Amino acid sequence: MTAVRSRARARAASAAAVIGVLMCATSACGTETAPSGAAAQSETNWEEPSLYTYTLKSSEGERTLLGTFRVTVRDGEVAKAVGLDESGRRVVKQLPGEVPTIGELLEELEQARSDRADTAEVEYTADGHPVRISLDWDKNAIDDEALYVISAYEPAGA
């Protein structure tokens, strides 16, 4: 009798575990974690100012835009870019047009989302500007990732 109860409990526990795993797996399929709170609101409310400066650290993947940069944006265009490390100085010297505005980084994020990239994530500050953008178009591909960290953001007049 005890052996029968033990087997019945074991089966019930196994069934519950399988059901739990299946529920977790299927509830995550096809969903994207939506931003919440201030971050969600900021995603749609932040407007790129006409004049600002920021520091960009661009890393990961095999891309031309790698390094750390201090960027000045005026009227939606990069007015000045200074490479702050060896990679950044090389990009500014050889390919100055590759250094983006924050708006262009957000456009790249939206394009990755439209292309159904495996990873297209962004973190925002309370004022709404992005501070980290992580992209990976294909998790099974090597070196197609991009990580952008935005710091020292200063809108004109702030």
Image: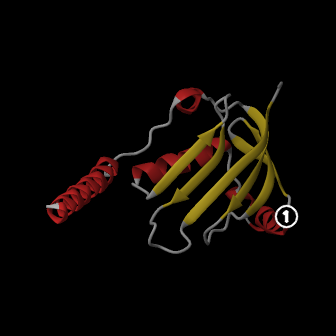
Q: Residue furthest front?
A: 1
Front residue of this view, candidates 60 and 103: 60
The x, y position of residue 97, in whole percent, is 70, 57
Please identify the quadrant where the N terminus is shown: bottom left
Q: Amino acid at mark 1?
A: Asp
Name which residue lies at 47% across and 53% down: 112
Question: Where is the C terminus found, in terms of image quarters?
Answer: top right
Assign a secondary structure to mark 1: loop
Residue 56's x, y, as percent? 74, 51
Snapshot quadrant of residue 146? bottom right
Closer-to-camera residue (78/20): 20
Left or right, 69 with respect to 24, comes to: right
Coloring basis for residues? secondary structure
Residue pictured at 48% horizontal, 56% vertical: 119
Question: Which residue position is annotated with label 1?
Answer: 85
The answer to which quarter of the image holds residue 107 is top right
Q: Residue 5 at what x, y percent from top left?
A: 18, 58
Residue 79 percent coordinates (x, y): 78, 45
Query: In the image, is residue 24 above or below residue 6?
Result: above
Name the residue at 81% across, 29% down. Answer: 156
- The residue most toward the bottom is 142
Figure check: 127 above or below 31: above
Mark count = 1
The residue at the point 72 percent across, 31 percent down is 50
Q: Residues within 10 Å of mark 1 (few under 14, many from 20)?
A: few
